[in-house]
Image (spheres, helix red, strand yellow):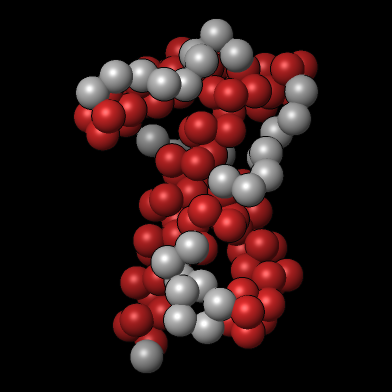
Amino acid sequence: MDYKREEIKEYFDDFIKENKEYLEENYPSTWQDDLHHEAFNTDYYIIGTYQAKEWLGNEAFNIIGFIKDYEESLFGEVYTDLSDAEKVVNMYVYIIGEEIVYEYLNNLEAVA
């Protein structure tokens, strides 16, 4: 699913610009391992129900299905409260963030 993927990638790119040096200096051997967690799991992407509903727009049900499939395939059940728009947005961004971080780290390895 690619809904707002570019927006999420820009968020990640900004995170890298602001934090990469700090992460490399303070976690020299593990910063890449913790990158997804630091970028997409230590703070909320969207705060507030109204903002979350606006962000989801007409894609809300598709995103809910996407999260449901993801969690069922990984965990065997759904853990995200799919009735909470804020939690839905933040989980979706978390999942797309995994893909973005994976691509970023692969590009780092290709350059090295």
Residue 28 position within the rendered picture, expressed as x and y whole percent measured from the top left: 52, 83
Q: Nearer the viewer, residue 90 or 11?
A: 90
Side of 44 where 35 appears, left or right: left
Say if residue 94 shows up in the picture: yes
Q: Is residue 72 left or right of residue 90?
A: left
> Residue at point 48% right, 49% down?
97
Work out whether 30 lies above or below 42: below
Image quadrant occupied by the N terminus: top left
At a point 56% along the width and 77% down the height, the residue shown is 27
Say which quarter of the image contains residue 107. bottom left
> Where is 74 relative to 33, above or below?
above
Numbered-mark total: 0
- The residue most toward the bottom is 112
Q: Work out which quarter of the rendered image holds the C terminus and state it.
A: bottom left
- Residue visible at 41% across and 79% down? 108
Q: Does residue 20 show up?
A: no
Pick whichever, 50 or 40, lies toward us: 40
Q: Quick one: 49 or 111, which is closer to the camera?
A: 49
In the rendering, at what x and y percent does residue 85 appear?
A: 62, 17
**Where residue 7 appears, x then y in whole percent?**
61, 47
Image coordinates of residue 64 in percent, x first then y, are 44, 18
Query: Horizontally, is 26 left or right of 18 in the view?
Result: left
Q: Is residue 18 left or right of residue 57?
A: right
Q: Is the residue 8 above or below the residue 89 in the image?
A: below
